[in-house]
Image (cartoon, rainbow, N blue to C red):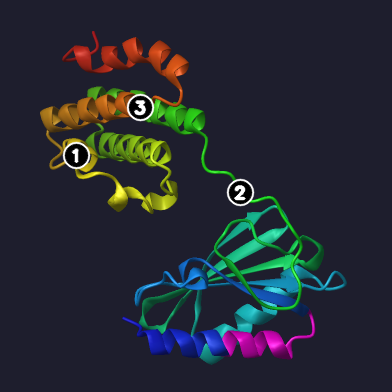
């Protein structure tokens, strides 16, 4: 695995690359390192503003070629968002580097983990946390699909849906307590009694009874953590309980 020193060398290389590229007019660090919270395993997140006269896709192409040639970086995937493109790389030592490029007129912080390194940023509204209604609705969908997959004998697919149900219920638990819900970032900060309860929703085998038990626990946990949306939860509760009240659908 990479060391913090190796990560810093990559960071310095990227900032030199930005300094030498006239199309880059501002840059910032984002993520845990930007706020001093990053540990020795933290990945590297840098975001750059591209001059309005330049083409973001051309900058991405040139940087990708440079990093592939000079640092053997592997381009994993892109994630477009509004006028920003996030490109994720894997460097030597399994260092993940997330680079994002935005037109200068839209370059600014979307959240609190933003540290301007050079240039100027505009004020942008911060991204709100996830919607409890949306998370609950998606979790209910997963519960239904998981139960049907059990009946169809598609046990691996059932495991996929039931595990996703559990994770969304944990996201609701995070929202209730003011913790970051996305990508499981707040899960380990949840109270022990909450995590102990959801331990029953962990799938330990693909046996039918094990899958049904995990589904039952996941649904119970989802309903316990849905106090932010009492009306929709109350309407969905009897239907969710139908999923786990009978041994099979006949």
**Distance of mark 2 from mark 3, alpha carbons?**
30 Å
Disc nearer the start of the sequence (2/3) = 2
Vertical placement of residue 77 versus 64, above or below: above
Q: Position of residue 46 (x, y in %)?
A: 58, 73
Q: Which residues are magenta?
A: 13-23
Task: Read off the residue under disc 2.
Answer: 127
Closer to the camera: disc 2 or disc 3?
2
Q: Position of residue 60 (x, y in %)?
A: 67, 73
Instruction: Report if residue 149 is visible in the image.
Output: no
Disc nearer the start of the sequence (2/1) = 2
Q: Which mark is residue 193?
A: 1
Q: Are marks 3 and 1 in contact (CB under 8 Å)?
A: no
Foreground residue among 65 and 23: 23
Give the residue drawn at x 31%, y 81%.
1
**Left or right: 204 with respect to 241?**
left
Task: Read off the residue under disc 3.
Answer: 145
Query: Which of the image's four quarters has the C terminus?
Result: top left
């Amino acid at each position: 695995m990479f060391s913090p020193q190796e990560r810093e060398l990559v960071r310095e290389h990227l900032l030199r690359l930005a300094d030498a590229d006239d199309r880059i007019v501002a840059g910032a660090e984002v993520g845990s390192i930007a706020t001093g919270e990053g540990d020795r395993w933290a990945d590297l997140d840098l975001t750059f503003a591209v001059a309005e006269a330049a083409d973001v896709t051309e900058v991405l192409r040139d940087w990708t070629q440079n990093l592939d040639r000079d640092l053997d970086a592997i381009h994993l995937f892109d994630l477009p968002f509004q006028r920003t493109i996030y490109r994720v790389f894997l460097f030597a030592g399994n260092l993940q580097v997330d680079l994002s490029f935005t037109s200068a007129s839209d370059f600014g912080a979307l959240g609190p983990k933003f540290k301007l390194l050079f240039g100027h940023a505009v004020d942008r509204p911060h991204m709100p946390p996830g919607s409890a209604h949306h998370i609950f609705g998606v979790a209910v969908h997963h519960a239904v699909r998981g139960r049907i997959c059990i009946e169809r004998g598609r046990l691996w697919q059932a495991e996929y849906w039931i595990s996703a149900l559990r994770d969304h219920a944990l996201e609701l638990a995070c929202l209730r307590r003011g913790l970051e819900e996305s990508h499981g970032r707040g899960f380990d900060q949840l109270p022990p009694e909450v995590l102990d309860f959801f331990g029953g929703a962990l799938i330990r085998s693909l046996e039918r009874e094990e899958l049904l038990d995990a589904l039952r626990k996941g649904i119970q946990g989802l309903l316990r953590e849905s106090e932010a949306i009492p009306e929709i939860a109350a309407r969905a509760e009897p239907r969710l309980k139908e999923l786990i009240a009978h041994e099979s659908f006949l």
